[in-house]
Image (cartoon, grey):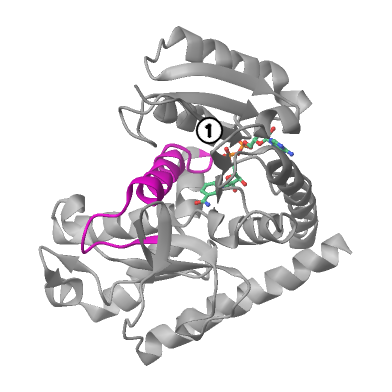
Amino acid sequence: AKEPVRVLVTGAAGQIGYALVPMIARGIMLGADQPVILHMLDIPPAAEALNGVKMELVDAAFPLLKGVVATTDVVEACTGVSVAVMVGGFPRKEGMERKDVMSKNVSIYKSQSSALEQHAAPNCKVLVVANPANTNALILKEFAPSIPAKNITCLTRLDHNRALGQISERLNVQVSDVKNVIIWGNHSSTQYPDVNHATVGGKPVRELVKDDEWLNGEFITTVQQRGAAIIKARKFSSALSAASAACDHIRDWVLGTPEGTWVSMGVYSDGSYNVPAGVIYSFPVTCKNGEWTIVQGLAIDEFSRKKLDLTGVELTEEKELAYSCLS
Ligand code: NAI
């Protein structure tokens, strides 16, 4: 039998946490033959709720779940973890400026980066979900220099899956037949959902949809603004789809992407496709042996170029804002 893997979920008493921990305990993230020990971190005001989640995990009697650590201590939470899913963060409240939210979150990610660096298992894979996801991930990377940059990523898989979902609905085809959409850039409304290389059953999505106006307009804005649409409908932000996407992200990273298929991940940019280097930018990637590689050589038309640049500019500005909060 396999040794259990320790998986950290921060913000585990929150909405996404509540949807995510049972998925992990059922093997959806790491495979149905991989035992896990869940480490759940939250802050003291949420300690009682966190303990309630722990009680439910016990009550669910998950065969793969070999232990649960529920704590408000960052060091205890990070110790020995091989996967860290960072969902905890400070939400934007009414009347708060962007800079205030940024300031709260970058200071959280700066302090948690040290705990991960010192106490996580070597080669721990980190996925940042909490917003601003790309910039939180960047701060975590910058303040944990001994964690390799390739191990620190942010979640844009939800946006990727939303794009697959929109195409599948439009063409009335199975979502599993839609492949190779791309989310470029920031997990924000400047992200660029790109279908220029996407296929259904091997045929280009553009040829099948036959409506460039929709693909270049409403399709893009629907994906960009889907998070807001969910809040409007549910009064809470996306949780089950975010949790599911986090599982998809880690599973493909660890177990590999299927041949001929790529996924979108926010990763430390090396300047591929002439986007800014040194920010966490979402790219198309393939994964093999636990490592991601940016898909190279895709043609970028003029329309796309502008959109890749725009979201890159926003990430550069966020980086500057984050640093101005820290100084
Ligand atoms: P939530 O507010 O229900 O849960 C957040 C949890 O984090 C709370 O339990 C809170 O106590 C905890 N927390 C706050 N500060 C913490 C700290 N320093 N350490 C540990 N835990 C801490 O929020 P929800 O809906 O679960 O969303 C979580 C985050 O994920 C938000 O930032 C949200 O914007 C983001 N998000 C990102 C998505 C993506 O695709 N990247 C999609 C959906 C949400």
Residue that label 1 marks? 7
Q: Nearer the viewer, residue 156 or 295?
A: 295
Magenta segment: 235-264
Horizontal relation, residue 20 to residue 136: left or right? left
Residue depicted at x 39% and y 62%: 222
**Whereabouts is ligand 1, in terms of quadrant?**
top right
Please give left or right for residue 177 compared with residue 245 in the image.
Answer: left
Say which quarter of the image contains residue 75.
top right
Instruction: Name which residue lies at 74% across and 26% down.
Output: 72
Q: Does residue 13 appear in this view?
A: no
Within 10 angstroms of label 1, few (less than 14), some, or many (20 or more) residues?
Answer: many
Q: Would you say residue 249 sits in the magenta stretch?
A: yes
On whether residue 208 falls in the magenta region, the answer is: no
Which residue extends farthest bottom?
302
Amino acid at dot 1: Val
Image quadrant in which the N terminus is located? top left
In this rendered view, identify the residue nearer to me: 172 or 114. 114
- Residue at 70%, 49% (x, y): give it: 92
- Nearest the camera: 258 or 96? 258
| Quadrant assignment for the C terminus | bottom right
Residue 141: quadrant of the picture: bottom right
- Lateral position of residue 291 relative to residue 216, left or right: right
Quarter of the image for residue 61 reads top left
Task: Measuring from the top left, give residue 140's x and y in whole percent.
Answer: 69, 54
Residue 203 seen in the figure: yes
- Mark 1 C-beta closer than 8 Å to ligand 1: no
Seen from this angle, which residue lies furthest right? Answer: 327
> Residue 189 placed where, x, y %?
52, 66
- Of helix, strand and loop, which one carries label 1? strand
From the top left corner, tell me how far across and down residue 93 is, in percent. 72, 46
